[in-house]
Amino acid sequence: MKKIFVNEIKENEPVESIFLVKHKSMLSTKTGSPYLSLLLTDHTGEIPGRVWEQAEHLAKLFEKDDFIKVISHAVSYQNSLQLTITHIALCPLSEITLSDFLPQAKNDREQTFLKLTTITEEIHNPYLKRLVDLFLADEDFVMLFKLSPAGKELHHVYLGGLLEHTLSVATLILEIRTHYPDLNLDLLLTGGILHDIGKIHELTYTRSFDYTDSGRLLGHITLGIEMINEKLQAIPDFPPELATELKHLIISHHGAYQFGSPKRPKLLEALILYYLDDLDAKVNTIQSFIQREKEPHSKCAGYHPLLERYLFKSLDLKDPHHTYSTHQEEHHD
């Protein structure tokens, strides 16, 4: 069966395809009849689904985060498409291509990784360079590092997102080195490359983006420190004070206690890492949100629940004749 993607679905057409179940709930109509409400997704988007007939029976066949084959018809409801589903079958994992269902980084992951390894040549301290090289020579680590997202729902939420975010932070560090020439560039660059490595164990992405048990119980900062400690055992002469400073960059890179850092930045390099990490995360969050805007000619991109504000697009100065619709600009922050 040829996969029909969400962005290919058109009104009044039959849809027979495989989707990932993002949400599932049994509800009742006004007359008390049960129906099944679903949110189905793939890497191109998501679409609601409704099962009106045999809802209770079909609901027993699958759970949230399962892949299901559906036979359905696309209809318009309140100006949005949804699927009226008549048949559901659980889909074996052997039939699944993960990249069909989870979003991916736009850039080639191998090329992104190559760029990051090139940047590591800017680390001249032999101990820090050795530590980074141990990670990049670890095939199991590299495999997960290339594949992992950087977050569950806020920033770089796609396969390869962690690698992309890490390269971006490392690149930003190199961009500011001439502006702040007194920085310990080796320490800052090593911290930038390793600050989020714990996310390869914090996040799961085999079906949907979520947290692992260790991710929920420990978090990526603690997991990252454990990973660094393990590698440091292979470098017995690594200076203890340097190890302490590097770990401080890792544990303080969220900047404040309420954001998950057990310590606030107390080194200049730690403070810079926090701001660059936060900058890259926020920029990606806003860019991704704007790119999903369904009304491209509206200046207002909508309300972002996690940032708790309405986001707007700046005027495109390359097109001075372009005008935005202002019907959504009555919203207030």
Image (spheres, rainbow, N blue to C red):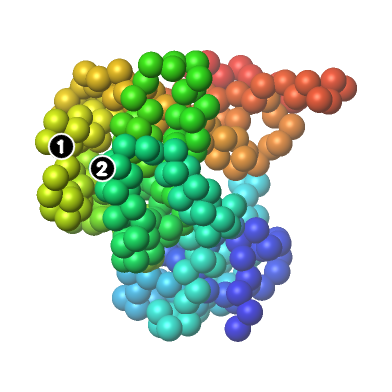
On screen, residue 319 above or below 12: above
Cα distance, mark 2 to mark 1? Answer: 8 Å
Who's the residue at 68% across and 63% down the image?
8
Asked if residue 14 can be seen in this view, the reply is yes
Who's the residue at 70% across and 69% down the image?
13
Q: Secondary structure at mark 1?
A: loop
Asked whether the beta carbons under mark 2 and mark 1 sit within 8 Å of each other, the answer is yes
Asked if residue 210 can be seen in this view, the reply is no
Q: Amino acid at mark 2?
A: Tyr
What residue did someone put label 2 on? 127
What residue did someone put label 1 on? 239
Q: Which numbered dot is residue 181?
A: none
Can you give x and y, in whole percent of width and height, for residue 278 in the image? 40, 28
- Please tell me which of labels 2 and 1 falls first in the chain: 2
Q: Residues within 10 Å of mark 1 (few under 14, many from 20)?
A: few
Who's the residue at 31% across and 62% down the image?
138
Q: Residues within 10 Å of mark 2 (few under 14, many from 20)?
A: some
